[in-house]
Image (cartoon, grey):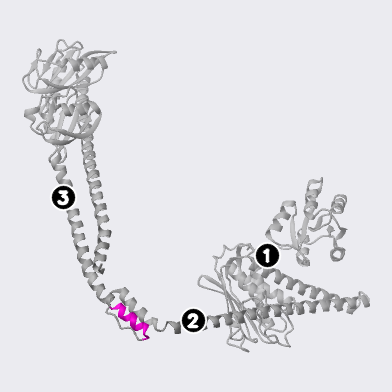
Amino acid sequence: MTLRSHLLILVAVAVFPVLAFAGYVVVTLWQEQRAAYAESYLGNTRALAIAVDSETEGYSRALQGLVAESDPDNENSPRFVAAARRELATQPTWSSIAIADAGGKHAVGVGRNVYEPTAGFIDPSVLKAVVISGRPAVSGLVQSAAGATPVIQVVIPVVRGNAVTHVVAANVDATYWVRFLSGFTVPEAATVTLIDREGVIIARTLNNERWMGKRASNTFLGEIAKAPLEGKYRSTSLEGVPFQTAHRRARSGWIIGIGIPMSEIEAALHRPTIVMSGIALAALLLAVLAALYVGRRIALPVASLADSAQALARGAAPATLRSHGITEVEGANRAFAEASQLLNERQDALNESLARERQARTGAEGANRAKDEFLAMLGHELRNPLHAITAAMAVIDRVPPASPHAVRSREIVVRQAHHLTDLVDDLLDVARVTSGKIVLDRKLIELGRIVRRSVAVLQEAGRVGDHPVDLEIGEAWISGDETRIEQIAVNLVENAVKYTPPGRRIRVRVTTEGNEAVFEVSDEGEGIAPELLPRIFELFIQGERTLDRAQGGLGLGLTLVKNLVELHTGRVTAQSEGIGKGARFVVRLPRANAPEREVSDALAVDRDSRALRVLVVEDNADSAETLRTLLTLRGHEVDVAHDGPHAVERALATHPDVALVDIGLPIFDGFEVARQLRAAPGGDAIRLVALTGYGQPEDRKAASASGFDSFLVKPVDLNALSELLTRY
């Protein structure tokens, strides 16, 4: 079978289901449209029923106004006759007005110009219904007492006390209803019929003279019997024409029917069907012609594929195929052209894979070396302060406590202990950041104030050395964690100090650029090697150490800075023109709106501290004794306990002002100490401060839940402790 035949089959398989579906859609739409037509006709009957009721009820209101105006006491009331004539002058469709007593006797009629004492006639069935119900009613088609013109009567009761004494009727010319029905907008070919409760035709827009006063067709009346209120169906007109019919019963009991010849509906439905069918057949014809044309265009280049394949098998260059604009044939051209180079490309890919493997192995070895260097550096950084502490303690053991040597040795111990604390804090912070355990305590803060304070703290602690620091601090507000922002500032400044020879300047700048707050630290130091610059923020990466560099480090600071900045949705970059040309670190953080200016809490005058009774609860005897000594030197009265039960006993016995309670106590922990004290009489008066080596948010929450007032992380910052005791 040829390619063209396959294409024709493909077209048939694709097109015929579409055509079948299109036919189904056409039939469905036909049915839905026919139902929509029927529903619209029913809507027309509803509107007409409302209009008919409005008209007859208007007549009733007019008669009620007549009765209210004339107040007839009997059938011969002059006031009633005069009022009736005035009403007839305003009602062109009324032929006369009749009045009778409740029994239908003594009926008289009032024409437009004459008073007819014996011409009044009221339909007995309607009169009876009005007297019984006491409500207005409308008759069917009746013969007027004044002549042969058919009328309909609108009858209302005249009530005296609780009884109907008279009835008043308006005779409305039946021919008016033909004009009434013709005044409504209905489909052009529609026939509107109005019949009374007995099935007699009152008015009809088609052949009214012929059918008025005659009964409607049995089919129509039968459908009304099935659906007394409203309905839609197919029927046959009085002229024998198939109709789509709808009817609706008005409140008066009359029936309004609308019929449309089925031929009109079918014609309206046939037009779009013929158009859609023509389009479908045209599409089928075009699809067949397109399949023949495309098949020919494809068959020619495909026939030459075998020749090209044989040429490729012989190692020769394949002949270029005529594509005729066909993408697949062009793809075949490219495939044949590339196939001759396939083996070479595979070999190149293999070589590239081997090169990547060697590069990955080299990177892994480099990472392993960085780890080894870090471990070696960690050992070195730990040995240096430990050696200094050991030597200082040896001096303290050999000289009097008050001697200058002992004082200097104690200073060395404190300084090196702080250095060890900083190393451990850096390690813990990097571990927390990389594991995602740091939760920022964000608030609105002023970046310039924090940077200025951080530099001042470093200068006061002597950690800036002999470096002049130029400050260019502007106001820049951000949303961030004040402690972590201070950590970023301290790390960047200390990094500049480490890699800048003594005497050279360090510049610190805070400003704003657009929607960003910018913090910049630049130096005149050793600079960064080009090969190191892209990796400067990686873990354990450090610049080359020099012999004159007094401060050490683990290569964690910049990694910590990068992670903390990114936690604040900011970014940090490093710039250097090379070795010996200094470095510049720029931190960019999202800028926040400045708050309204208020009097700063910082302007408040600190209260004078006073001597307190302090209970120190610590299971480590050395730590407890050291803390006792420091607090005693500050003028406080200090007591010590080493376990949970002893702590509760001493606290309840001495009632200290403040209790510094270690969380990790023997027998039961600090949380239980707090709970027991808070439950004991007088325990609420003691200020409880938790001491722990853990500083995570969940630790603070647990301490607060147990009854602690404050929370300090070991090793305790003496300034922070002093400030806390001052507040108490």
> Measuring 22% from the left and 72% from the top, which residue is drawn there?
296
> Amino acid under label 2?
Ala
Q: Quadrant of residue 118?
A: top left
What residue would you read off at disc 2?
349
Is disc 3 surrounded by few (<14), some (14 to 19) or many (20+) residues within 10 Å? few
Query: How far from the left and from the top, in percent, is residue 335?
Result: 37, 78
Residue 391, numbered label: none
Distance from disc 2 to disc 1, alpha carbons, whole Å, reads: 68 Å
> Amino acid under label 3?
Arg
> Measuring 58% from the left and 67% from the top, which residue is drawn there?
478
> Amino acid under label 1?
Ala
Camera-side mark, 2 or 3 = 2
Give the magenta-colored segment's residue range.
304-315
Left or right: residue 693 versus residue 263 is: right
Residue 271, numbered label: 3
Of the 4 image quadrants, the one containing the N terminus is bottom left
Does residue 308 show up magenta in the picture? Answer: yes
Instruction: Look at the numbered disc 2 and give the secondary structure of its residue.
Output: helix
